[in-house]
Each structure stands twice: as structure tokens, then as C-alpha cells.
Image (cartoon, grey):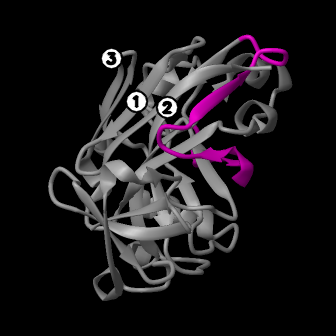
């Protein structure tokens, strides 16, 4: 099931995207978190998908991210593989939606990179989740772009500023609740040219392992987002570039880069 968050004439709602081509969206009562996806209730209102504006599928309390989780990406960045996952946080204010602009703060950074990733959406409050029960706390999956000011990342020696600018966490286009994340193709393109391509089966730490690791550190809340890491092929973006992250069985997230005054 594909569940999207969207803007309509009188506010914001969640809905189920219907049909293989996603021609319509059926509005839900309230929000879907804490509810078995099979038990969601519909208002009876349906809209042509082309006539609504899709928003970031969640407004998380926090975005957790994992660095260096594909071996080839570790090599391309010139680092060493760590014995445990490398965690960092992106602020909730970095989240933006499908079709929204990635604002490049040129007064502060000269190099902005794309990083296409699989994102996990948490569905219930949890802590200390055993690996074999991780699926019980996962609501669904979406596409993500962990946009990074690479020069600031290198300069600062830690990643908060480089990863934390407004619009530096595009998510979307919706949440897919019925997919198996263990072996999905992930492709990032810039202006139509393929820049990244890998499969989630190449993750050094898979999704259940990451849920167990992260939840041992902090409580996860419904709507929280976990970015699982980017494959090799990261690179720079320029003003006007259109960057897309496509994940098999989920969809495509597309954003355009614009210079921020």
C-alpha cells in the first residue's frame, strides 16, 4: 500500500495512492500511524493525483542517518569500514517533499552533493527492539536524498552543519508499506544521467540490524525516519540540476536545485 501526505484545498491529509499508475488518491481519516495499514479508514473522498500536491510523507521528530553503509562508498570516500554503524542526526527542519526545491546556500558552501538512500519510516514508539522483531515497528519505506555540503563536512570534522541545512532531506513521494527492503534496486540520476546504482542487499548493516542498533540508543517515535546509507557514486550538484532517487517497488523522488540568496 502506498500512503501519501498531500495538500488539498482545505488543508493537509493522508491518502492511499490507487492503481499501478497512481491515478487517484483516496483520503484517509486522520493519520495512519499506530494503525495496522490493513485497518485504515477512508473518508470516501478521492482526488486525481495530478490535482493534489504531494508533501513530505512524514514530519518526523528526528531523522537518523547511517554513514558508510555500502562498502564501495566507503572506498570512494577514502575511509575505513567501521566495526559498528556510524550514526548522525539531521534536523526535522531539513525535511522537504517531492518536487520541492533543494536550496543551495552558496554564501556558506561551495559544494553540495546528492546521496540517494532508502528511508525507513517508524510506525510505533519503541526502544531496545530485537533484530528479529524489527518489522513490528516499521510502518513503511520511502526514497530519500541525504543532501550534503561536502566542503563543510570536511572542514568541520563532524557532520551537523553539512547535513542540516533546510531542504537537505528530501523524502517521498509516498510511504510503501508492503515491500521487502532486503534487495531493492536504488538508482540516483542527475538531469537524467545515472550517477548511482546499487541494491539494498549490498548494505553492510541491513534494516533489522540498524533498527536494533539505533533503538538501543534512543526511543523512536511514530513518523521518525531512518536513512540507511548511500551507495557509491555520490557527486556534486549545480544550480538548476534535477536530481531523482528511484527505489524499486517504491517510486521516484525528484527535486530541483536552486541557489538560495
Residue under circle 1?
A: 244
Q: Give the structural element (helix, strand or loop) at label 3.
A: loop
Residue sitting nearer the eye, 8 or 180: 8
Which residue does the numbered mark 2 point to in the structure image?
255
Q: Are marks 3 and 1 in contact (CB under 8 Å)?
A: no
How busy is the neighbourhood of tag 2: few (under 14 within 10 Å), some, or many (20 plus)? many
The answer to whether residue 112 is above or below residue 255 is: above
Work out how far the residue at label 2 is from the one at label 3, CA to CA, in angstroms: 12 Å
Per the rendered image, the range of residues in magenta is 82-110
Dots 2, 3 in contact, CB < 8 A: no
Residue 216: x %, y % from top left: 63, 70
Q: Earlier in the sequence, mark 3 or mark 1?
A: 3
Q: CA distance from mark 1 to mark 2?
A: 7 Å
Counting from the top left corner in percent of width and height, residue 121 is at 48, 63
Tell me whether circle 1 and circle 2 mark residues in contact (CB < 8 Å).
yes
- Which residue is tagged 3? 192
Residue 109 to residue 38: above or below: above
Check disc 2 and report its element: helix, strand or loop. Answer: strand
Please identify the quarter of the rendering in which residue 215 is found.
bottom right
Q: Is residue 199 above or below residue 154?
A: below
Give the residue furthest to the left: 20
Question: Residue at (47%, 62%) from the top-left corner?
Answer: 5
Q: Pinpoint residue 70: horizontal percent, then vertical percent.
A: 43, 35
Residue at 39%, 15% in the rendered image: 191
- First in sequence: mark 1 vs mark 2: 1
- Find numbered disc 1 in the image and state the secondary structure of the residue it sits on: strand
Q: Outermost residue, front direction?
A: 9
Amino acid at each position: 500500500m502506498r500512503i501519501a501526505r498531500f495538500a488539498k484545498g482545505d488543508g493537509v491529509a493522508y491518502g492511499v495512492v490507487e492503481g499501478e499508475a497512481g491515478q487517484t488518491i483516496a483520503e484517509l481519516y486522520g493519520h495512519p500511524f499506530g494503525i495496522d495499514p490493513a485497518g485504515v479508514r477512508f473518508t470516501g473522498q478521492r482526488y486525481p493525483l495530478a490535482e493534489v500536491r504531494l508533501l513530505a510523507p512524514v514530519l518526523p521528530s528526528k531523522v537518523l542517518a547511517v554513514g558508510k553503509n555500502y562498502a564501495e562508498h566507503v572506498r570512494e570516500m577514502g575511509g575505513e569500514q567501521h566495526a559498528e554503524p556510524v550514526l548522525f542526526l539531521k534536523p526535522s527542519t531539513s525535511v522537504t517533499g517531492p518536487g520541492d526545491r533543494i536550496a543551495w546556500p552558496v554564501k556558506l558552501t561551495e559544494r553540495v552533493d546528492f546521496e540517494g538512500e532508502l528511508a525507513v519510516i517508524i510506525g510505533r514508539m519503541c526502544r531496545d527492539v530485537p533484530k528479529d522483531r524489527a518489522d513490528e515497528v516499521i510502518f513503511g519505506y520511502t526514497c530519500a536524498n541525504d543532501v550534503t555540503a561536502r566542503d563543510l563536512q570536511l572542514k568541520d570534522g563532524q557532520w551537523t552543519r553539512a547535513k542540516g541545512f533546510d531542504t537537505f532531506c528530501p523524502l517521498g513521494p509516498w510511504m510503501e508499506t508492503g515491500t521487502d527492503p532486503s534487495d531493492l534496486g536504488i538508482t540516483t540520476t542527475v538531469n537524467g544521467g545515472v550517477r548511482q546504482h546499487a541494491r539494498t542487499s549490498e548494505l553492510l548493516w541491513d534494516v533489522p540490524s540498524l533498527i536494533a542498533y539505533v533503538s538501543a540508543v534512543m526511543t523512536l517515535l511514530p513518523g521518525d525516519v531512518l536513512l540507511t546509507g548511500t551507495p557509491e557514486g555520490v557527486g556534486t550538484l549545480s544550480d538548476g540540476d534535477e536530481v531523482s532517487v528511484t527505489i524499486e517497488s517504491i517510486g521516484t523522488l525528484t527535486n530541483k536545485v536552486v541557489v538560495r540568496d
